[in-house]
Image (cartoon, helix red, strand yellow):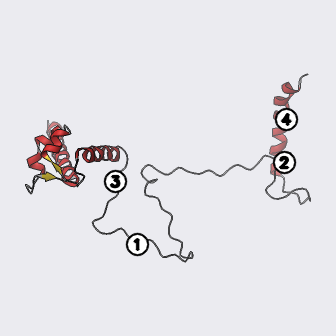
Amino acid sequence: MRWFLALPVLSMLALPLAAHAQDQPPSDSAGSAAGQYQPGTLPPEPPVIEPPLPGQADNMQPPPDPDDGQPPPPPPPPGGEQAAPAGHDAAMMRKFEARFDAANTTHDGRLTLQQAQDANMRAVVKHFGQIDTKHLGYVTFNQLMAWRMDQMAHEMERRAAALRAQQGQ
């Protein structure tokens, strides 16, 4: 019989012996060092590490260790950058922000009507007067996001009204 044919048979015979040996209390023999694999036993199973839930990975930070001698990190300044929304919305926001930055050829954070036209930002061009509420001749990224959120809120209200009307029939 060839040796490679005997390997599956030998491993099947070793499993019941290993399971039985695992039920036995550990021996205090000089050859059994802690943490080493002993013949006739199964190796210890690796620890199970749970992946973070969706949306947690970006915001997870270990708690500050009070014994490390370092002061805790300061809180973010008020009015500073906020955390981006998770998932699809964050990707869409980053994509639109990149498009805004590419259109803003003066790199001053202000998008003029001409810059929006040159970048073929049709919705911004069409509604520039609504977005530029202070009539300064330019819009900022935050103004664009606020306008877009207002548009989405109006659309959601319209859909909710349609569902309520459908429910009442």
Residue drawn at 83 percent across, 46 percent down: 20
Callout 2: helix, strand or loop? Answer: helix
Mark toward the start of the polypeptide (2 vs 3): 2
Disc on the earlier residue, 4 or 2: 4
- Measure the C-alpha gap from mark 3 to mark 1: 20 Å
Q: Amino acid at mark 3?
A: Ala
Circle number at residue 13: 4
Closer to the chain start, of discs 4 and 1, is: 4
- Residue at x 46%, y 53% (from the top left corner): 57
Neighbour tally class for label 4: few under 14, some 14-19, many 20 plus, Cα within 10 Å? few
User: Amino acid type of disc 1?
Assistant: Pro
Would you say the residues marked 3 and 1 are in contact, meaning their CB atoms lie under 8 Å apart?
Answer: no
C-alpha gap between disc 4 and disc 2: 13 Å
- The residue that label 3 is drawn on is 84
163 displayed left or right of 11 = left
At label 2, which amino acid type do we have?
Ala
* Nearest the eye: 114 or 67: 114
**Residue 29, position as x, y percentages in the image:** 91, 58
Q: Quadrant of residue 120?
A: top left
Spatial CA distance of label 4 from label 3 is 57 Å
Q: Nearer the viewer, residue 26 or 8?
A: 8
Q: Looking at the image, which residue is at 50% across and 70% down?
A: 64
Q: Read off the residue under disc 2.
A: 21
